[in-house]
Image (cartoon, helix red, strand yellow):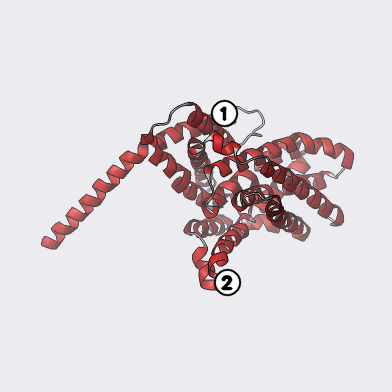
Amino acid sequence: MKQLHCRSKSVSRHITTFAEELKILLPGIGLASIVAIAALISSSLQTQKVISPLLIAIIIGIIIRNTVSVSKAFEPGISFSAKKILRLAVVLLGLKLSFSQILSIGIDGISIIVFGSIGTFLFTCWLGAKLGVDYRLTQLIAVGTSICGASAVAATTPIIGTSEEDVAYAIATITGLGTLAIIGYPILQEFIQLSPIEFGVWCGASIHEVAQVVAASFQNGAASGEIATVIKLSRVLLIIPVIVLISCQKVTSGKGFRISNILSSIPWFVCAFVLLSLFNSTELLSAGLKSFMLALNQFFLCLAMAGMGLITQLRKLANVGVKPLCLAIISWFFLGTITLFLIKVTSI
């Protein structure tokens, strides 16, 4: 009886602690939620969704942070949104991936995606070091350019452990260049005269965001748009080995190359992300539930980005300088060039 009474008191104490923590977090989460909803509404009003709601959320957050005095009462919830909720959103990104997609594009398509993306990631990391750009910001730009824009930046942020200013800079730069691609790629098509399939592959293999790929490729017809979408979604799968590579690099640089160190370096949410991707590949999840969870995840991502923006101070962002912008531009040019070359030398 005494033991049961002790357990009851312990449970009651835990509930009280949870309620107190929730009370502290709610103001900041509430503010970030309002910003996230505003970003999603703003994005939905675009006739062509070329500007990511993640970027909009960060911008609104930055404006609020740097024009209105945000009370300290909001800070715990804002920090929770930017860090903890971001990890949950990364896990749910696994629902966008299906390993069967890669099999549908053949060996040539896989080669273009792998060599183009991995080559760009390694080249950007090398060039960032040569330019003297902070290695954490370099990795954000590298993964955002080579894999899938703002989503890739969001997915790798918890692993790289960079500042909110670096995240905001990387997302703004990469999204801006991807938006230029929507206008630029169809114009370039008039000069280089790719076939509809080739143009679709080029768009999917070298433009940053999924929405930007769709907006650019469908201007050249349905055939270009459909293959571009498949290529782009297949390219997103590369986020898995890149995340593992970054995790391994962090631990081996300090502890040496050991399998046990490498395995322990991979964060739990990355393992959950991979498992959810594998489960999604089985196609056991109903279309309705999957659609709901992806919509919920879009909100979580916007919530996390709103938190990032609400923490970001413009004076710190200005201190980053123009070198990272040059890095992002050169990296994007490299990706576009190498994928175009690979398209020309393959029989896709």
Say which amino acid is labelled 2: Phe
Which dot, 1 or 2, sits closer to the camera? 2
Question: How many badges with numbers are in the image?
Answer: 2
Say which amino acid is labelled 1: Ser
Indicate whether 254 appears above or below 34: below
Please give the name of the residue rendered at 82% of the width and 43% of the height, measured from the top-left corner: 196
Residue 345 position by quadrant: bottom right
Q: Secondary structure at mark 2?
A: loop
Question: Sequence-wise, which precedes: disc 1 or disc 2?
Answer: 1
Q: Quadrant of the C terminus?
A: bottom right
CA neighbours of label 2 inside 10 A, class few (<14), some (14 to 19), many (20+): few
Indicate whether 175 appears above or below 244: above
Please give the name of the residue rendered at 49% of the width and 57% of the height, measured from the top-left corner: 272
Q: Is residue 246 left or right of residue 28?
A: right
**Considering depth in this image, is 328 or 242 the residue closer to the camera?**
328
Q: Looking at the rendered structure, which numbered label has been put on residue 42?
A: 1
Q: Quadrant of the N terminus?
A: bottom left
**Residue carrying label 2:** 257
Please give the name of the residue rendered at 45% of the width and 31% of the height, measured from the top-left corner: 34
On the question of residue 227 being in view, the answer is no
Please give the name of the residue rendered at 60% of the width and 27% of the height, measured from the top-left corner: 45
User: Residue 36, how many percent across, how many down?
Assistant: 50, 34
Q: Secondary structure at mark 1?
A: helix
Q: Is residue 333 left or right of residue 88?
A: right
User: Residue 186, how many percent across, how many down?
Assistant: 80, 36
On the question of residue 140 being in view, the answer is yes
